[in-house]
Image (cartoon, rainbow, N blue to C red):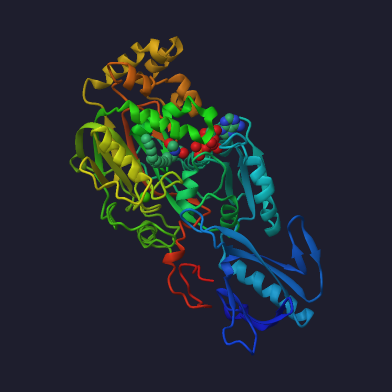
Amino acid sequence: METDLKLESSVFVGNQRYRAVLTGWHFNWTEVDKKHRDKKTISVPVAEVLAVEEGRVEILPKKLVEDKDKDFTVFYVKRSSSRGSSGLLWRLGRTQFRCPSRVLRDQWTKHLRAAVKTHSPLRPHKLLVFINPFGGKRKGRKIYHSVVAPLFELVGISSHVIVTERANQARDHLLKKDLTGFDGVVCVGGDGMFGEILHGLIGRTQQESGLCENDPAVTLQPCPLHIGIIPAGSTDCVCYATVGVIDPVTSALHIIIGDSQPLDVCSVHHASALVRYSVSLVGYGFYGDVLAESEKHRWMGPLRYDYSGAVVYLSNRSYKGIVQYLPADRPLSSPRDKTRCLSGCSVCSRSTERLFPHSPDSGTVYSAQYSQFSNVSEGQWVSVEGRFRCVSLTCMSSCCPKSPQGLSPSAHLADGTGDLILVWDTNPLGFLKFLYRHTSTQDQFDLPFVEVHRVKAVRFSLASGEEEDAYEELAGQGSVGMDEEDRGYVETVSRSSSQQQLAAIGTRRQMTKELKTPSPFLCGLCCSKSPPVSVWNCDGEILPFTEIVCRIHCQLVRLYARGIEDGTAAHNCSEGSDKCERRCILH
Ligand SMILES: Nc1ncnc2c1ncn2[C@@H]1O[C@H](COP(=O)(O)OP(=O)(O)OP(=O)(O)O)[C@@H](O)[C@H]1O
Ligand SMILES: CCCCCCCCCCCCC/C=C/[C@@H](O)[C@H](CO)NC(C)=O
Ligand SMILES: [Ca+2]
């Protein structure tokens, strides 16, 4: 079959003659110029050919076709020379070819289209798109219609677009509505919007499989639909950590070619009920306080995080707690090994082999054995107790523009583990050093008050007697930030454990209204006593509980992405090489 897809002939690009060659995996064209020895070759992996059209085609400012009999146009992924922050920016490449005859032109279009079909089996045909018109700088609608929709149209993707009118609309749609025929779901927004898609798809998949999400010991079913993220939020951490850049064109092109990046997901539970899922940060102390503070200043837009970071830092707080964790089984890597999870990561590939041992394509036969959790004995939990500046659990590096290396630079996207970062109480200067190192390449774990562990589960509790005091104290602080309604809510939180009540809790904005933590600024600088508990930040949402259990689920969802492409680390794949496993980026 492969040989059928081979083709070679002379073609013209403008007035210059080229030798075009289609091998199984690459489409190359080389200048034919007898005078010059250095021949220029352009090589495009077939998997990155976006569309093949008869005639000379333009798509911008609008689609224009000059159908000359012997012409065809190839659209493909072109890597931009200007690097996007951490990964590579992708742009739409276009070359118009002229053949010696119409017969040859038809052969080229037929062979190229067949090769694309063979080498990109996961390209979506139909997508469900949710746009949050209020995310980030409120540009979601414009970004989709001016940048993404024309690209989807070019390649023939049909999309059903829903502009959301309320928070949780996308999640509810995915939980209840008919999803037949869709290959994937795209969210245009930030991490909060991604969270809605994540919860909708995971919940729907477990419902359909008859699995109970409440029990952390249950092996959840991976979601069949892919998720695409068009970044239009404030932090866009999930997009940055899985693509390496925050750029709608790059993300749209990853969706079009059907790239597939599995992602670990952490489920967070309280009193035998699921609270939320997370892919980036479950953080107590500093990151929880920053989020709670920032919600009061949403009007500042993305700047609210910088302002709140400074306010919370100045409040100089630490919290008592008991942290228990289950170290990762047979870990393939360590959080201090100074490696990075990049596109084609071998640690994640080996985890895929462990998870799906019988499937050559990795994805059909799920190994419950690898993800088994229920037979863990109590003695396997490691326990530490003390005062912490922050306790953070992250399933991935959680890099973002503010922290280009991330909370845990050597964490992996799809290895079934998370990194638990414990920052013990320390002096303000020490903690500032730790925070500052997030913004540079310095090792934030190389500090005497910081430890990091690669784990598969974490439990957090307050010291005995502490929890009741904590809630009483919060309820008693009505004069600081709580009205009658809030006090009622705190009572509900401390006594309830049902998932229905959790579902009713809703968005982070509602949460800050319902469970107003006293301002850390006020408490740290103006009051004599600090509050005894912080809040958990779960991918940018405040959790209504302090005592939680977290479990990492290996590769529970798949994104239209391929991990961060690091141009400098590209391996030496010779031009036209047929078997480039890493979808070589040297062309
Ligand atoms: N139409 C809507 N009206 C109000 N809120 C909405 C609407 N659609 C979605 N939301 C909610 O808005 C919240 C924030 O949206 P989003 O994540 O897109 O932007 P952001 O908060 O600016 O970015 P980030 O999450 O990256 O910081 C989400 O949690 C989502 O549930
Ligand atoms: C006093 C100066 C403070 C500087 C602090 C710099 C540290 C930046 C680290 C950022 C890590 C962000 C981790 C990502 C979290 C996301 O899940 C979440 C949702 O978007 N974002 C936030 C801000 O909670
Ligand atoms: Ca991981």
Image quadrant holding the C terminus, namely bottom right
Residue 292 visible within the image: yes
318 left or right of 364?
Answer: left
86 left or right of 62?
Answer: left
Where 251 falls versus 426 (above or below)?
A: below
Image quadrant holding the N terminus, namely bottom right
Q: Which residue is drawn at the image coordinates 47% and 27% (left, top)?
A: 295
Q: Which residue is drawn at the image coordinates 39% and 21% (left, top)?
A: 519
Q: Which residue is drawn at the image coordinates 46% and 44% (left, top)?
A: 237
Residue 271 visible within the image: no
Q: Position of residue 113 (x, y in %)?
A: 66, 69
Question: Which one is in front, 283 or 267?
Answer: 283
Q: Position of residue 289 (x, y in %)?
A: 37, 29
Q: Position of residue 58 (x, y in %)?
A: 75, 62
Numbered marks: total: 0
Q: Which residue is drawn at the image coordinates 40% and 13% (left, top)?
A: 487
Q: Position of residue 574 (x, y in %)?
A: 48, 78
Where 430 falls versus 479 (above or below)?
A: below
